[in-house]
Image (spheres, rainbow, N blue to C red):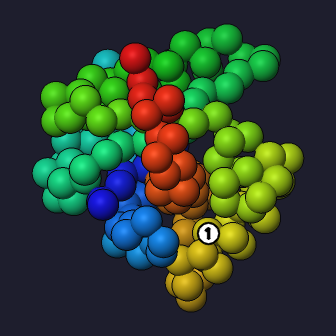
Amino acid sequence: MRILGIDPGLATMGWGVIESNGYKEKLIQYGALLTYPRDSFPTRLQSLMFGVRSLIKTFQPEEIAFEELFFSKNVTTGIQVGGARGVALAVCREYTDRLFEYTPMQIKQAVVGYGGADKHQVQMMVKMLLNIPEIPRPDDAADGVACAICHAHSGAGREQFLIK
């Protein structure tokens, strides 16, 4: 199964594509969609829309997994990132209804084995699990890959994580 993992963000939307046979994952590609503060909010959203469409066209994932948003302080940033997530969800829904969502703690638990793992531990495990020579960069790309790995590891129970 080919899985696209997405770490939503307005300035940087990380993504990773893996293939999983149910026992082992293989990295296909990773990266980040970037937008710039000098551009208007609608322009930035449009750029993300085009970027996500291109990812789907290029990699044709069977399922798509999102990292759930978590905000504790900056409401304005949260609203803007929510807009970016909304655009990505809408574009992905044009392609498939196989959209899933995992909390940061679930992703850490699936990748590291500990829901309180720090960013570096997650990155090192992504590198080890996929047997790749270096940690995916930028950090948001590693998070997208980790999200895809989490989805692959969710197995038969994945239906509970479908975005409704």
Residue at the location (78% across, 64% down)?
A: 121
Please determine whether, in this image, residue 9 is positioned above or below residue 55.
above
Give residue 139's quadrant in the image: bottom right
Residue 109, above or below 137: above
Q: Nearer the viewer, residue 39 or 96?
A: 96
Q: Residue at x 55, y 66 (%)?
A: 137
Q: Residue at x 82, y 53 (%)?
A: 114
Residue situated in front as seen by the camera: 69 or 105: 105
Q: State the residue in front, 42 or 24.
A: 24
Label 1 SS: helix
Q: How many marks?
A: 1
Please tell me how crowded label 1 is: few (under 14), some (14-19), or many (20+) other residues with Cα within 10 Å.
many
Residue at x-position 14% and y-position 51%: 57
Image: 99 above or below 154: above
**Residue 89, image x, y percentages:** 34, 27
Query: Is residue 45 in sight in this rendering?
Result: no
Seen from this angle, which residue lies furthest bottom?
A: 133
Residue 65, above or below 114: above
The residue to which callout 1 is attached is 126
- Where residue 134 appears, as percent x and y from the top left, is 59, 82
Residue 128 in the figure: left or right of residue 162: right
From the viewer's perspective, is 89 left or right of 135?
Answer: left
Can you give x and y, in whole percent of width and height, for residue 100 in the image?
Answer: 43, 35
Does residue 125 appear to the left or right of 62 in the view shown? Answer: right
Q: Position of residue 40 (x, y in %)?
A: 37, 22
Q: Quadrant of the C terminus?
A: top left
The amino acid type found where label 1 is placed reads Val
- Asked whether residue 70 appears in the rendered view, the answer is yes
> On the rendered image, what quadrant is the N terminus found in?
bottom left
